[in-house]
Image: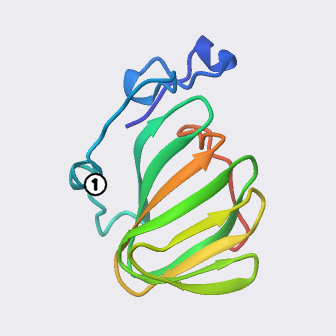
Amino acid sequence: MTAQLDERYEKGFISAEAALDPEPQIRIVNIKKMIDNDKLTEKDIFKRTYLGHARMSSAFVFQGHKGPFKQHIHVTHDEIGIVLSGSGKVTVGGVTYAVNVGDLWIIPANIPHSGEFTEPTNVLFISSPQDHPVHQDRIWTQP
């Protein structure tokens, strides 16, 4: 899904598209169905399946293949990650941790982090403030 910014962006809203509009609302989504409808393919390097947004937070599922995920930072938002499926290790601020289903990590903004998955892996991420789906603040710190 690609969002187009409109004049409401300046007022703190993302898009005229209802599915990506972060106006506070009650939203219930089935994460499994969302992933099934947006499956990772061999052509994808990785995939981000957006689940919803509010004014101060957003949620998406990272879908990754077995193997490395490059080191990067997020300039403006903190990230909370929860492993839904798969396993591997994450390196946060130079320290590496083994992660498995059910594990949670918290990464403050501007802290370098990366992953190495031993199998295809899905991670639920909650970002605050929101991780903008069009203008993401990810900066790769490795080529």
Question: Which quadrant of the rendered structure holds the N terminus?
Answer: top left
Q: Residue 71, image x and y in percent?
A: 66, 72
The image shows residue 89, relative to residue 12, as above or below, that is: below
Left or right of 133, for residue 113 = right
Q: Residue 116, image x and y in percent?
A: 52, 83
Quarter holding residue 66: bottom left
The image shows residue 80, relative to residue 21, as above or below, that is: below
Q: Residue 19, image x and y in percent?
A: 38, 28
**Secondary element at image label 1:** helix
Figure colour scheme? rainbow
Quarter holding residue 100: bottom left
Q: Residue placed farthest to the top in the image?
A: 7
Residue type, numbered disc 1: Ile
Closer to the camera in the image, 94 or 100: 100
Residue sitting at x 66%, y 41%: 129
Residue sitting at x 41%, y 44%: 50
The image shows residue 109, relative to residue 18, as above or below, that is: below
Q: Residue 135, image x and y in percent?
A: 62, 39
Q: How many marks?
A: 1
Left or right of 109, for residue 133 = left
Closer to the camera in the image, 101 or 143: 101
Residue sitting at x 31%, y 62%: 40
Quarter holding residue 41: bottom left
The image shows residue 1, relative to residue 67, as above or below, that is: above
Question: Which quadrant of the rendered structure holds the C terminus?
Answer: bottom right
Residue sitting at x 53%, y 40%: 133
Q: Residues within 10 Å of mark 1 (few under 14, many from 20)?
A: many
Residue under numbered circle 1: 35
